[in-house]
Amino acid sequence: MFGTYDRPDQRNMLDQTRQGVIGKPLDRPEGHLKVAGQATYAAEYQRPNCAEGVLVGATISQGRVTAIHRDKVMSMPGVLGVYAADAMLRRAAQGMAAEAPKQDVQIVDFPMQPVALVVAETFEQATAAAKALQIDYEETSDVPFSPKGQETEPGSEPIESGDLEATMAQMAHTIDVTYTTPGHASAAMEPHASIAEWDGDKLTLWGSFQMLRYNVKELADSLGVASRNVKIMSPYVGGGFGSKLGISHDAIAAAVAARDLGRPVRVVLTRQQVFEIIMRRSETEQRVRLGADEKGRLQALGHEAWVSNLPEESFAEPVVQATQFLYAGENRRLAVELARICRVTAGSVRAPGEAVGMQVLEAAMDELACEMQIDPVKLRKRNIPSTVPGDDTPYASRKLAEALDEGAKAFGWDKRAKKPCQRREGEWWIGMGMASAARVNMIMPAQARVTMRADGSVLVQSDQTDIGTGSYAILGQIAAEMLGQPIDRTTVELGDSSLPSGAGSGGSFGAASTGSAVFRACEAIRAVLAGRLKCRPDDLQLQDGKAWAEGIEPRDVTDLLDGDIAKIGRIKPGKTSNSHQQATYGAFFVEVAVNAFTGETRLRRMTGAFGIGRVLNEKTARSQCLGGMVWGIGSALTEELAFDERDGHLVNHDLAEYHVPVHRDIPPMEVIFVEERDPVASPIQAKGVGELGICGAAGAISNAIYNACGVRLRSFPMTPDKVLAELPDPFAK
Amino acid sequence: MAHTPAARIAVNGTYHDYNGDPRRSLLDFLRLELGMTGTKKGCDHGQCGACTVHVNGRRVNSCLSLAVMHDGDEITTIEGIGMPDKLSALQKAFVEHDGYQCGYCTPGQICSAAAMIEELKADWPSALTEGVASNPVPSDDELRERMSGNLCRCGAYDNIIAAIKDAMGKEVAS
């Protein structure tokens, strides 16, 4: 069985099985390790005789290295080597690259790009030597530092249909606005780290990665070794959010030094390096044009974005990805233009595209609703198209209207004042805002092995990672459900590249893809068990270690086992990927307080309603949504990469200056899951959940700020200085 | 003057003599010297709180403190709060409420919360407390304010507060 998913699996099997663990809000099986600090992350393996490496960043913005003065630091205490090998990376790999990214650290592409690795006996010695290392450069200035005023090239094929301009001119209600969003950082809590150890020509690398199947190839290609000689261990990953999709500088540098020194080498990025050298989300400028007829039906829709990246990078933030299918408007132009600039690589940061595209589209939709004096929820419901505008593709399951309704009801949206500046509590303006949520959905090739042991216990194995997403929990639940075993008789092993290749953690596709592979492996085991019980697989009933079928008395499943049954399940995207428009949908509702004197915005409460297909674990799925909503708060109010436009260097390169939300920024939060099964998406009827919670959230907050105090900023983040400049007279009656 | 001061440091009740590099942080002493990696390094600059431990009962960022400065101090790390087979009530509450996702900030959150609960009992005010003499009432906002030194990029904040409240409630009840 090749496993291509060509026809929607309508059997809905996980609703027929009897174990009753699927979807349940079970605790994470690895939770007891995490809360005791005993889950082992990349840098924490105790390898004998491990040397410590520290990367050295370029002090020029672009150019080349002409000399590295090794001698002086080689005589410093404990120093073992200074490396600037051809294999070392100047850029981190993009997600799913599966090949070496840009190598050769004699060339400098952007400020602070690693140009050398210093290795010493101890971390302190390596750090001191790295700081002391003198490097000569030849500086160039071919690439501009700011996207402002630069020529651009298409970042993707524009989508055009009908006549946008002519239709805009005829519409009763139009909006033509330009918003900006700043660069974002993933800022996962665990810095990128690698321990490399060679055994002959075989490399073991303990690293922090999201997608091992691709990472193995990236490592092998970069080092010029065969993939079969590379093993990655990444069972626990301290957050990724896109930044660990591809390999980064630490991995190859550690491998190069370890091979030369004949001993393990550990390289951990400093927090500043994580910000400076891995991956940024591009800043965007977005022009949104909306044209609606008298009844509020969109007839014209323009969404054009300007983003940036380094030369020769193919990634362009896909800003208009959800705009393509979310709302009506046959006359449309959707486009992304890309400028080439000298700043750290732009790549995937949680929900690439929608994270910034949706927040702007949803802010513009609010502007249209205000212009029309129509309820923003109504405006959105009025514009849910029957097929994808422009290409007539039918939709897979889509719960946008339900999410809007259920979210509005739970939140108490009917209490929202229709105009700004209607509600004041002391020095605070109070307002409400909403936005739709949307994120494309897909599956990716995935494999998993499931073993039912002779004692009936179940082992699930895949190189799938769990970056906090809940893979350990949900993959075990799928197997326990399918094979009728209690959850505590199920073990899940992940993050070892020698195991069958899962989809990896990215693009919200890990759960549905690798989950489907586990599902199919279990189906194969069920077929064996059914054969032994002498019933049809569809008639087989399994629960709490018992097996039966109609007319066949229950017996212990162990009676059917004379040894282990191990099966590998496989799935690949097939015709369902193109036959329907697949996406997850939802709605955000927020209440904010804006200080009438200082412009400070505080979230008071936030509700998200989401349709994500089958919920595999209500607890971990809810957490994924909460996390996305927290990111939305950061995008709306505080997060902003600040680059110096004179030399491209990142000014706020740490957690003191790049402001991710903290405890105090987060209000009480509510997550509602709209009941949904999506057989087009996957045989387990599940879709993705890891990114939807951010896609539009910041728009809801900006809309609430407007509703509170009448300030319509078109520049994220909406910091107090920007709000203050626009605030109405706090004493006006 | 190549003199290295020695420090005798009690970690979770066990004494360790430190004669190493004076540049070594308390955090790296725990992680690299003792191999106790439950305490996490997130920023090495006192910005994220992942390295929070207790020094003589008070929560500190162990990355901002040198090992040699802790002669005679008693350090409690996450390993001292509870190991997987014998979790504290607070740790159990984090599991139950999903007060984490990736788990990397978690030991710091728990160490911080454990000390914060003691600070509340001792009537320590926070920035949110009106007047230093008033007893801080642990509202959700009060807890959020006091926990704001511990970043969680996965955004588990709401669940972390729920876990802390749950554990505090159980402590009061027992």
Image: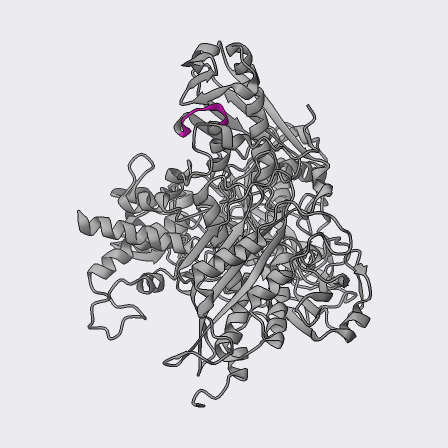
- Residue at the far left in the pictured view: B174
Q: Residue at x 77, y 56 (%)?
A: A390
Q: Which residue of the protein is positioned furthest toward the front in this rendering? A: A295
List x then y, in percent, for residue A44: 46, 41
Q: How is the image coloured?
A: one colour
x, y percent for residue B151: 43, 57
Residue A9 visible? The answer is yes
Residue A196 sits in which quadrant?
Answer: top right
Number of disc labels? 0
Q: Is residue A486 magenta?
A: yes
Figure check: A458 above or below A509? above
In percent of width and height, residue A201 lies at: 65, 28
* Depth order, front residue of A433/A269: A433
Q: Is residue A522 left or right of residue A414?
A: right
Instruction: Give the residue displayed 33% in from the left and 57% down from the top.
Output: B60
Q: Foreground: A266 or A591? A: A591
The relative height of residue B9 versus residue A47 in the rendered view (above or below) is below
Asked whether the viewer can see residue A258, the reply is no
Q: Which residues are magenta?
A: A482-487
Describe residue A84's horizontal placement relative to residue A508 as left or right.
right
- Which image quarter is the N terminus of chain A in? top right
Percent from the top left, x then y, of residue A105?
70, 51
Q: Residue A4 colored magenta?
A: no
Q: Which of A465 and A700 lies nearest the eye of the viewer? A: A700
Residue B30, above or below A539: below
Please report the residue visible at 47 percent of the width from the left and 56 percent of the height from the top: B43
